[in-house]
Amino acid sequence: MHIVNIHEAKTHLSRLIDKAANGESFIIAKSGKPMVKVIAIDAPTAGETRRVGFMAGQFSVPDDFDRMAGEEIENLFGVGS
């Protein structure tokens, strides 16, 4: 991870913020000692990666899902009567 000193951070703040917003987090140090970590707000934290299909195998969708309660829905909207 990129480390910048406070003076560099103040001088190039806009550029550094743009990089952080694009996923390139960085650390600001004071006298060589890391003080803060700057990351994008919407970046997932470690171990919090969102993934597609995380509930695979947890439930099943019936084959007639598109037709379930069809008659009831038609009656609600006055269709078919």
Image (cartoon, rainbow, N blue to C red):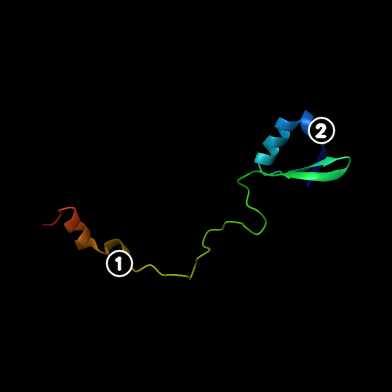
Left of 76 or right of it: where is 31? Answer: right
Q: Which badge, 2 or 1, comes first in the chain's sequence?
A: 2
| Callout 1 secondary element | loop
Which quarter of the picture shows residue 49?
bottom right
Percent of width and height locating residue 74: 19, 57
Percent of width and height locating residue 53: 51, 62
Q: Residue at x 26, y 63 (%)?
A: 67
Q: Residue at x 38, y 67 (%)?
A: 61
Left of 29 or right of it: where is 18? Answer: left
Mark 1: amino acid: Asp
| Callout 2 secondary element | helix
Q: How many marks?
A: 2
Q: Are marks 2 and 1 in contact (CB under 8 Å)?
A: no
Question: Could you give the CA–CA distance between mark 2 and mark 1, rounded to whole angstroms?
Answer: 62 Å
Is 50 located above or below residue 16 in the figure?
Answer: below
Mark 2: amino acid: Glu
Return the residue at label 2: 8
Which circle marks residue 64 in the picture? 1
